[in-house]
Amino acid sequence: MTGSAVGDFEEFVVARGAALLRTAYLLTGDRHLAEDLVQSALGKSFRHWSRVRGGNPEAYVRQAMVRENVSWWRRRRVAESSMADVPERSSSNETTDVDRRITLDAALRQLSPQQRAVLVLRYYDDLTERQAADALGCSIGTVKTQAHRALKKLREVSPELVDLWDSADEEQEVRS
């Protein structure tokens, strides 16, 4: 690989590394696994960087992360178990970001890796259905179906998320 390609790769990692790590954390639910996932995906992407850098390198790395995460999940395939109850909302009307994060994290752990990947790519990374389908290597219909099923399951397992988001929206309107 040429020095220019290595420099381009380093620039990409510096510019997009934090965003990739956030996405990986949402996919895995664990900071250390997220770091490993990003490192693994970047390592695989580096081998093909001369070909990748001309297209959409971030989409390529995200797709590598999603595929690697599913591969890890299949290898460790542990039976699903319920998590401890989600913490009750505080008695005050003010909901903190921490409460939302804890509740969302617990709810996301109830989803399959593919459903979690679809939600992260669509709603956190704000990708279109087409972009998410490309990143996951599936059809747009699969993205739509998985998103629908994931949102339905989130509503079932964690209905308090709706209340948390509604109260956050109300707080935002008051501050505006």
Image (cartoon, grey):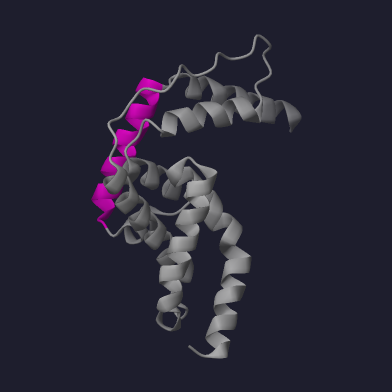
The answer to whether 4 appears left or right of 132 in the picture is: right
Write down the quadrant of residue 15 in the picture.
bottom right
Write down the quadrant of residue 44 in the picture.
bottom left
* Nearer-the-camera pick, 52 or 176: 52
As drawn, 102 above or below 25: above
Figure label count: 0
Residue 117, horizontal then vertical, whole percent: 38, 47
**Residue drawn at (45%, 54%) of the image:** 127
Residue 58, horizontal then vertical, whole percent: 48, 66
As drawn, 84 above or below 2: above
As drawn, 52 above or below 75: below
* Nearer-the-camera pick, 92 or 141: 92
**Residue drawn at (26%, 42%) of the image:** 145
The answer to whether 140 appears left or right of 61 in the picture is: left
- Residue span colored magenta: 138-157
Outermost residue toward the bottom?
Answer: 2
Residue 56 appears in the figure: no
The answer to whether 55 appears left or right of 175 in the picture is: left
Queried whether the magenta region covers residue 140, the answer comes back as yes
Q: Main secondary structure of the magenta part?
A: helix
Write down the quadrant of residue 119 in the picture.
top left
Residue 118 appears in the figure: yes
- Quarter of the image with the C terminus in it: top right
